[in-house]
Image (cartoon, rainbow, N blue to C red):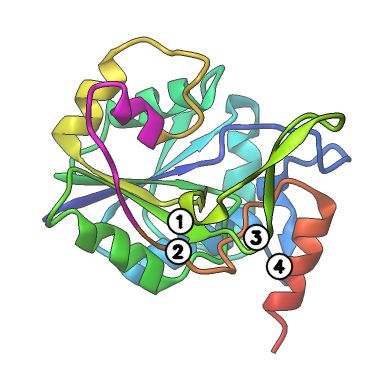
């Protein structure tokens, strides 16, 4: 089956501090987004790779590709107001029968995790990689809370994989604020995702601490 892989890097979040969007920060010797692109190319060099980027940062990305001698074929799409709209823009050029969507700032996703997600499409229209919780879990406020059974909850990762026609149908509908990931968009049309195991290193960079952890993980 032909695969399309959408790598979402359309945000310019400021939680990391500084002026450079986190997808362009160095992880080891290369920018985060280059690590992510290389990982999916390693998984399947024949897949259609699409990267969503903030419009104002496309030129900078192209300069990085030259600087780090990256020749991986991929298509660029403008990021939208919300992640939802970035995905809509990318879906307009997808040509694969199976589509994966991955956070550009999860550079250490394993080949095994990616493979499990696509493998899951043999039995389901939607597949989501997750990790079980290790810590105890409470629900409520700081003043009043109650214990929650952690075995019934999971941490949600990407790539999330879908049959193309299901994903296209889901994204034709309008944006809703409760859409936090692509699986929630597909659930809105009645599709329940299959859960598969992710890898613990598949961390999403949202803070300086996350970047420090990933830098430690890639040390030889």
Q: Which residue is mark 4?
A: 214
Give the CA distance from mark 4 to mark 3: 22 Å
For the point 13% across and 54% down, the residue is 123
SS under mark 2? loop
| Horizontal arrangement in the rendering, residue 88 relative to residue 47 (left or right) | right
Q: Are marks 2 and 1 in contact (CB under 8 Å)?
A: yes
- Expressed as whole percent of the image width and height from the top left, the position of residue 136 reads 68, 56
> Quadrant where the C terminus lies?
bottom right
SS under mark 4? helix
> Quadrant where the N terminus lies?
bottom left
For the point 15% across and 53% down, the residue is 2
Q: Are marks 1 and 4 in contact (CB under 8 Å)?
A: no
Q: Are marks 3 and 1 in contact (CB under 8 Å)?
A: no
- Residue segment shown in magenta: 183-195
102 over 71 or under it: above or below: above
- Expressed as whole percent of the image width and height from the top left, the position of residue 190 reads 22, 26
Q: Considering depth in this image, is 63 or 114 the residue closer to the camera?
A: 114
For the point 76% across and 60% down, the residue is 211
SS under mark 1? strand
Q: Which mark is residue 130?
A: 1
Q: Is residue 179 magenta?
A: no
Q: Which mark is residue 67?
A: 3
| Horizontal arrangement in the rendering, residue 94 relative to residue 7 (left or right) | left
Q: Considering depth in this image, is 61 or 121 the residue closer to the camera?
A: 121
For the point 30% across and 67% down, the residue is 115
Q: Nearer the viewer, mark 2 or mark 4?
A: 2
Comes first in the chain, label 2 or label 1:
1
Q: Which residue is mark 2?
A: 198
Q: Considering depth in this image, is 75 or 183 the residue closer to the camera?
A: 183
SS under mark 3? helix
| Horizontal arrangement in the rendering, residue 195 relative to residue 152 (left or right) | left
């Amino acid at each position: 089956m032909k695969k399309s892989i959408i790598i979402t890097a359309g945000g310019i979040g400021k939680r990391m501090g500084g002026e450079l969007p986190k997808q362009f920060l160095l992880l080891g010797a290369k920018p985060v987004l280059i690590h992510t692109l290389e990982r999916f190319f390693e998984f399947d060099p024949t897949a259609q790779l699409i990267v969503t980027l903030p419009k104002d940062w496309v030129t900078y990305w192209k300069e990085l590709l030259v600087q780090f001698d990256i020749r991986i074929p991929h298509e660029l799409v403008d990021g939208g107001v919300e992640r939802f709209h970035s995905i809509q823009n990318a879906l307009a050029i997808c040509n694969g029968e199976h589509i994966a969507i991955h956070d550009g700032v999860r550079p250490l996703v394993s080949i095994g995790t990616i493979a499990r997600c696509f493998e899951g499409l043999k039995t389901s229209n939607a597949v989501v990689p997750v990790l079980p919780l290790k810590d105890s879990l409470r629900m409520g406020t700081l003043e009043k809370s109650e214990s929650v059974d952690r075995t019934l909850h999971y941490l949600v990762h990407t790539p999330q994989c879908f049959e193309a026609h299901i994903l296209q149908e889901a994204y034709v509908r309008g944006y809703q604020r409760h859409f936090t990931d692509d699986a929630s968009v597909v659930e809105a049309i009645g599709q329940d995702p299959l859960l598969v195991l992710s890898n613990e290193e598949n961390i999403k960079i949202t803070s300086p601490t996350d970047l420090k952890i990933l830098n430690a993980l890639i040390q030889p």
